[in-house]
Amino acid sequence: MNWGNRILLLYLGFVALIITLVVFSFSQKVDLVSPDYYARELNFESEIIKMKNEAALDEKPTVSLSNDQLLISFPSAFKEKNITGSVLVYKPSDANGDYTQAIDAIKGEVKIATHNFCAGMRKVKITWKADSLYYLTESVIVIP
């Protein structure tokens, strides 16, 4: 085999590798955090204000996992107040595993059953309102 044939084989091998990579990349599933990601990005300033409100609190809401339940406990200063909002539990690697629930806190606690969640890391994003102020709390949990 002469050097011309070797160069041709090398070139054809490179082209086959590139075609394989392109086909592989198009077959990968890519999930954004939310379908309306770009529209939500325009409203990010309001989320920054909510995070600053939450940072100013002396006591922060806590997120814990126990006995197939996700327990969200709000600060003791808010126990007697009306807390409304929503909880988004999302799995960054799979949009099909996302879960949203409205908050109507009873005695400063919200319980979410986790027996339907598949194992893995989840991000918990709590958007809540109390005393006409909005707050945003984010946390990470791992479901075994």
Image (cartoon, rainbow, N blue to C red):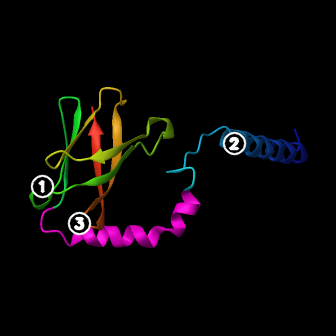
Looking at the image, is mark 1 or mark 2 earlier in the sequence? 2
112 inside magenta stretch? no
- Disc 3 marks a residue whose amino acid type is Asp
**Pick the front one: 94 or 88:** 88
**Pick the front one: 8 or 77:** 77
**Pick the front one: 82 or 70:** 82
- Disc 1 marks a residue whose amino acid type is Glu
Whole-Å distance between the Cαs marked 1 and 3?
A: 11 Å
Q: Say which element carries label 1.
A: loop
**Which quarter of the figure has residue 91?**
top left
The x, y position of residue 14, in whole percent, is 77, 46
Packing grade of label 2 (10 A; few <14, some 14-19, many >=20) is few
Looking at the image, is mark 3 or mark 2 earlier in the sequence? 2
Q: Tell me, for residue 80, which label it has, or none.
A: 1
Answer above or below: position of 86 versus 40.
above
Q: Which mark lies nearer to you, 3 or 2?
A: 3
**Pick the front one: 4 or 14:** 14
Q: Is residue 45 left or right of residue 56?
A: right
Residue annotated with mark 3: 131
Residue range (magenta):
37-59
Q: Say which element carries label 3.
A: loop
Q: Tell me, for residue 26, which label it has, or none.
A: 2
- Disc 2 marks a residue whose amino acid type is Phe
Q: Main secondary structure of the magenta part?
A: helix
